[in-house]
Image: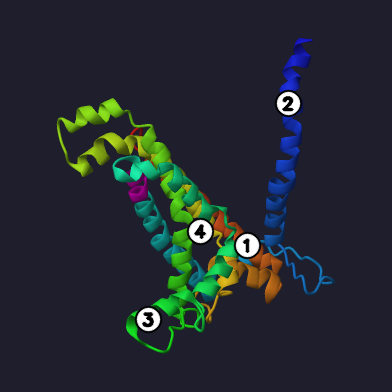
Amino acid sequence: MHTQKRSTPFLFLTPAVFILALVGIYPLIFAAWVSLHTYLLAQPNIPHDLVWLGNYLTVLRDPSFWGAIGRTLFYLAVSLPLEIVLGLGIAFMLRRGAWARLRGFARVALVIPLAMTPVVTGLIGRLIFNQDFGVANFVQTRLTGSKIGIEWLGNPTLAFVTVLLLEIWQWTPFAALIFLSGLTAVPVEVEEAATLETRSFWVMLRSIQMPFLMPALTAILILRTADILKSFDMVYTLTSGGPGSSTELINLYITRIGLRGAFDQGVASAQALLMLVLTTVLSRMYVRYLYKGDNA
């Protein structure tokens, strides 16, 4: 009877473990195997020869791969800090003062961008920034008096800026809601006692509120970094990586190598695993230097 009671939790966990192995562990192991072999989808009759680290060397020598990495890291370095700063500002606005009365409405409004799938966001962006009938050019022509609209999605720099704007618009509410939850954990009596010593916003933020916001900040950094590094849907729907390769982030480049152009699954799998390593390293750095910084 005692043995049966001890085995019961494992029986309940078995379906979840099986599903996790099916959708997570097996694809990862298979991708690692493919990355060590010749694997061309367009030529299924070619044997899958073992090339060891040959695919990884091909990736590391590919300048287009490093270009996509550079664009992706720049995309991350611009969008993530802006999302954090804007999200923190919105959270402070909704916590105290006149805006606090609209907290319930604001929470519903903030969920709307998050509820949209990235594909829908990309389609909306194509309509807003269309050169002929887009809302962005309608406003621009009215303000400047120009009869010619800006070619938002045809200019390499403006196309990248457009992708950044949509990314920040959709995911700033996520940071705002997480920060707002962190701020609600700050004891009111502690803040009131601290106001007797100082009225400085920055001193209050650094000494009183930041320890409660640090877990929220770490969660935002880890989740958003992983999402941004694997961005695909919105960018592909909006620009398909163009014009040229100006908005071709790393996930679009991996897709082009593995499924659209060369159909080289071996090289594409090696690229994907290198991105997995990069994401894991960044996540570990966030936890080590932010969340556990005080205990280190």
Query: Could you tell me residue 63's position as x and y percent?
Result: 51, 75
The tag earlier along the polypeptide, 3 or 4, is: 3
Q: CA distance from mark 2 to mark 1?
A: 35 Å
Q: Residue 228's mark?
A: 4
Task: Please tell me whether mark 2 sits on a helix, a strand or a loop.
Answer: helix
Q: Label 2 crowding class (10 Å Cα cut-off): few <14, some 14-19, many 20+? A: few
Disc nearest the viewer among 1 and 3: 3
At label 2, which amino acid type do we have? Phe
- Residue 138, visible in the rendered structure: yes
Instruction: Say if the magenta span includes residue 93.
Output: yes
Q: Quadrant of the N terminus?
A: top right
Q: Is residue 63 above or below residue 13?
A: below
Q: Which residue is located at x 50 percent, y 77 percent? A: 134
Q: Is the C-beta separation of discs 3 and 4 under 8 Å?
A: no
| Quarter of image, res 33 | bottom right
Q: Is the C-beta separation of discs 2 and 4 under 8 Å?
A: no
| Residue 202 horizontal side relative to residue 215, left or right | left
Chain part drawn in magenta = 88-94
The tag earlier along the polypeptide, 2 or 1, is: 2
The tag earlier along the polypeptide, 1 or 3, is: 3
Q: Residue 142's mark?
A: 3
Q: Which residue is located at x 25 percent, y 36 percent? A: 207
Q: Is residue 286 above or below residue 42?
A: above
At label 3, which amino acid type do we have? Arg
Residue at the spot of label 1: 270
Q: Residue furthest bottom?
A: 147
Q: Label 4 crowding class (10 Å Cα cut-off): few <14, some 14-19, many 20+? A: some
Q: CA distance from mark 4 to mark 1?
A: 19 Å
| Residue 203 horizontal side relative to residue 15, left or right | left
| Residue 33 horizontal side relative to residue 149, left or right | right
- Residue 287, visible in the rendered structure: no
